[in-house]
Image (cartoon, coloured by chain):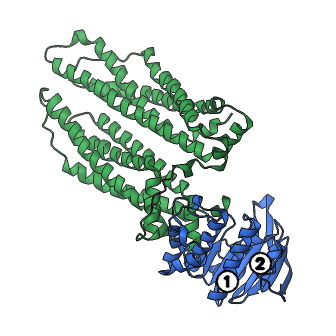
Chain colours: A green, B blue
Amino acid sequence: MTVSFKDALKFVGIIITVCCAVLVCNLFLNYAIDLNAVAGEVTEKQQIAYTAMKLNNKVVCAVTGGCLGVTSAVLLVFYIGHYIKEHSARFGILKALGYGDLKVAAGCAVFGLCVFIGAAAGYALSWALMPRFYAVQNDGDALPHVILHYHPILLLIVILPTVFYSVLAVLIAYIKLKTPALSLIKGEERLRRIKMKEQKGNRNFLTELAFCVFKDRKMLVFFVGFGCFCFGSMILMGLSMRDYASDMMGFMILIIGLILAAMSLILALSAVVGGNAKTIAMLKANGYSLKESGLAVLGLYHIPAVIGFAIGSVYQWGVLNVMINIVFSSVEGTKHYAFDWTAFGICLTVFVVAYEALNLFFVQRIAKTPVKSIMSE
Amino acid sequence: MIEAKGIVKSYGTSDNRQTVLKGIGLSINDGDNVVILGASGSGKSTLLNVLSGLERVDEGKIFYDEREITRLTDRELTAFRREYVGFVFQQYCLLPDMTVDKNVRMGADLADNKDYKDIIECLGLGEKLNKYPRQLSGGEQQRVAVARALAKLPKVLFMDEPTGALDEATGRQLLDYVLKLRKERGFTLVTVTHNENIAQTADRVIKLNSGLIVEDKQNPTIKTAYEIGW
């Protein structure tokens, strides 16, 4: 087998993201089915709230399932690409020995297992939370009492992603392995991608290095931006919606935002530091200080981080504005939504502290990169 | 002057520990051209790594003039390498996504050396300034590595098997460049090699076997890179 189960378990990012997606989707879909069953009991007074709740369920499932599903797929593409790059010699040798691309790529189906683990954990967790979730929704007279039922059809949200992502993993690996065996053995795949542009002569070495590191892996720039976008949008949303939804829903959005942000940022920054280990070692060997190395390798990633956070903040304002001031405007007693500057202040402070702490953590990882890794070519 | 006293260095875990350097003592004068000669596994590269401050010793002391580098913190050791030493490795270790100019500036910027292009010219790479490493031959890449090391104006240049990956003609040419530059600039040169012929170009030859110095002698007839066998 080209990929071991242990390798797949290292894809914690996908496991957690899938877990969150299935947790939320199962919770809301199960409730949506049970809510449909009580349609006949809805009074005239409850009609607006009932319709709003049905719409709310659809939006939460579509946004969470869609957003987290796409994130998992992007993570999978990135992880598999990264895995093949890291183990290119192993794949190259197998190809050189005569194994076909598809046979080598088939080993990557094992990555579907981490999707299964995440989905199963999310499913189990959602059932642990289900009674409490129903109790919160049943609180008050706005809606008829909804009774919790088990719906086996919803097991599909565990089975389908597992099958889909296993096939996707094999497909991605198959495409990535369409490289000559010798190039894989020599690890030339990355070098071929480097565009040989003339570098500006007036830039000093560290500035040029910072630009090279930044431009070399655009996917990581996306992940940093995306992580900060999640932080800005979901945490701010979780804090801002305390007057419009239950505490539980706000807390859930906040936690999912936090997990997604942490996953994306840790994944991206660790890949930046890991992928530049030899450069870092060379910098250290030559006597560049930790501060200089840290700035050269991680410094420019502050730009997508700030942009991601800013877009996320505006995005959450847009979503809540549309949802509350337009979609739910007809629901009696709904307060007008305005941008929550207090929540923004808290979120911004936490973001700055958390990002810088993470940055510092990875600078320390740079400090621990052994100088001897230069010699490991 | 570099002085090493009782250097011991081991690798591995406690139940599978291998002592690579078993109490090495030596001194190298400023401006010397020293070759450390030994077979594979004799500990020569490890000795170069500890002498240059790339690795720490388990026991013993290393002095640069009066300064004991074995007692320095990681930060101080980095600052020491910045000020004192340059490296050339067998596998060149160039940054693949940077041009020759930027690779050499890696060293030059550390010493605020604005004249680094002179070194590039001296090494016959003037035309290759905007080329990327993979557009160069092995010999040219190694010359870039030498230029990078010298551009930081080191007091000591350490070379680990600098011609190990080169063919004879290219190897001789590289060695010739380095020896000429050393005469011109007067830095101390410490070269690690298994090639006995290269040892004939040095002022002094230190032979290493199984982690111990077995011979340390001055070379009475120093030859140029083109006079030695290969």
Most distant residue in the right direction: B214
Most distant residue in the front direction: B127
- Where does residue B91 sit, x and y in percent of width and height? 67, 63
- Tell me which segment is drawn in magenta: A194-198
Most distant residue in the top direction: A40
Label 2 vs label 1: CA separation? 12 Å
Badge 1 amino acid? Lys
Q: Is residue B67 above or below residue A309?
A: below
Q: Secondary structure at mark 2?
A: loop
- Where does residue A212 sit, x and y in percent of width and height? 46, 59
Callout 2: 10 Å neighbours few (<14), some, many (20+)? few
- Where does residue B128 sit, x and y in percent of width and height? 55, 67
Closest to the camera, between mark 2 and mark 1, is: 2
Which mark, by number, is residue B226? 2
User: Is tag 2's residue or tag 1's residue first in the polypeptide sequence?
Assistant: 1
Which mark, by number, is residue B128? none
Q: Quadrant of the C terminus of chain B?
A: bottom right
Q: Is residue A260 above or below residue B67?
A: above
- Disc 1: which residue: B180
Badge 2 amino acid? Tyr
Task: State whether residue B58 appears in this view.
Answer: no
Q: Residue at x 28, y 54 (%)?
A: A348
Q: Residue at x 15, y 43 (%)?
A: A338
Chain ID for label 2?
B
Q: Main secondary structure of the magenta part?
A: loop
